[in-house]
Image (tube, grey):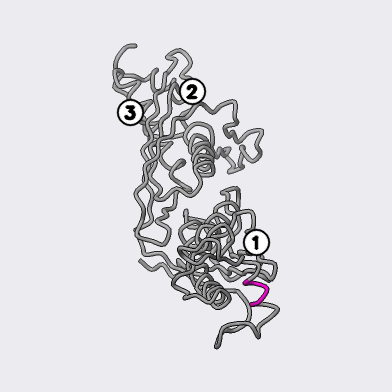
């Protein structure tokens, strides 16, 4: 397709000498909840408490190279890289813990920031115990084991396997005198793979829908006859606020993708469906008039003009 930009992203995961975990990535959050999601992925795959994980991103001096947050890719691409780095790191942690506990690495399990011998939960060491040896007491490490606890990984998802799916169903009412559209109900059915954090997921969908409603109903670039932009400030370029938004019913289903973690991108699922769904709802409401809704924004003056030019009487 001529696409020359790599789809991969990178992550560095490090366990500090005190046992705390640091995650470094090249993305930059614009409100998607990266810090929460990345920390949760690292905590899940290492077996540590989420409170012990700190995330840093977007610093080109300290973070590995990445392609940024766009195209609903962050959880899929960066999440995959975090998982790979955690798997590499955890294997080393288990090897050191097994050496300390005089057990086989295959018998070591990680949970709650501790490393247990399977079947003997009372026999354990903490991640802090392991990190202390790895960084500060390298003579106590297993043979042929390098000091430190840090891993960097790169991950590129397989194309077309991480797309999410969403269905938007609005119910609208049109005032025939003013052309004003009122949204009575709005339902979104979403499948974005394995859900990491329902709260951030629903927050993403709510915010994305506001973007979609803005494009469908309010936002418009208007120029005068001299090519001067007339909607260059938020006094003229309208966007929906909490006052203009409405209650949303969100239903979610999980179909994991064949990628690490089973994630899918969902940043756009709440936005893209809104313009077409709302236009179709207006079309359906005015179907008895024989009108065709073929543009956005769906402002009252546009809807009223459709009614005025209707082929059939009200």
Q: Earlier in the sequence, mark 3 or mark 1?
A: 1
What separation in Å lies between label 1 and label 2 (alpha carbons)?
A: 46 Å
Q: Earlier in the sequence, mark 1 or mark 2?
A: 1
For the N terminus, give its image quadrant.
bottom left
Q: Which residue is mark 3?
A: 292
What separation in Å lies between label 3 and label 1 (alpha carbons)?
A: 50 Å
Q: Earlier in the sequence, mark 3 or mark 2?
A: 3
- The number of callouts visible is 3
Q: Position of residue 105 (x, y in %)?
A: 48, 74
- In terms of depth relative to the viewer, which is nearer, 265 or 298? 265
Q: Are marks 3 and 1 in contact (CB under 8 Å)?
A: no
Q: Which residues are magenta?
A: 130-134
Q: Residues within 10 Å of mark 2 (few under 14, many from 20)?
A: some
Residue 56 numbered tag: 1
Residue at the extreme bottom: 144
Q: Is residue 243 in the magenta section?
A: no
């Amino acid at each position: 397709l001529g696409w020359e930009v790599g789809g991969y992203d990178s992550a560095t995961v490090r366990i500090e000498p005190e046992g705390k975990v640091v995650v470094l990535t090249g993305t930059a959050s614009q409100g998607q909840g990266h810090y929460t999601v990345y920390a949760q992925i690292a905590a899940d795959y290492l077996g540590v408490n989420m409170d012990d994980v700190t995330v840093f991103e977007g610093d080109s001096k300290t973070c590995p190279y990445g392609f940024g947050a766009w195209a609903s890719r962050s959880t899929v691409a960066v999440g995959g890289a975090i998982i790979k780095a955690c798997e590499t790191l955890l294997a080393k942690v288990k090897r050191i813990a097994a050496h300390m506990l005089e057990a086989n690495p295959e018998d070591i399990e990680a949970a709650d920031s501790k490393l247990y011998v399977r079947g003997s939960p009372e026999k354990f060491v903490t991640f802090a115990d392991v990190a202390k040896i790895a960084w500060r007491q390298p003579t106590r490490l297993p043979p042929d084991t390098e000091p430190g606890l840090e891993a960097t990984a790169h991950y590129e998802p397989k194309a077309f396997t991480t797309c999410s799916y969403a269905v938007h169903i609005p119910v609208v009412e049109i005032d025939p005198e003013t052309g004003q559209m009122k949204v009575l109900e709005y339902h979104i059915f979403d499948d974005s793979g394995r859900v990491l954090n329902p709260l951030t997921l629903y927050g993403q969908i709510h915010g994305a829908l506001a973007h979609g409603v803005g494009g469908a109903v309010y936002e418009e670039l208007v120029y005068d006859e001299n090519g001067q932009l007339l909607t260059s400030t938020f006094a003229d370029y309208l966007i929906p606020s909490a006052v203009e938004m409405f209650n949303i019913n969100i239903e979610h289903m999980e179909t994991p993708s064949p990628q690490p973690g089973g994630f899918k991108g969902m940043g756009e699922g709440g936005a893209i469906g809104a313009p077409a769904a709302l236009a179709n709802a207006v079309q359906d409401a005015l179907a008895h008039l024989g009108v065709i809704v073929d543009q956005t924004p769906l402002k009252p003056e546009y809807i009223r003009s459709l009614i005025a030019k209707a082929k059939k009487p009200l």
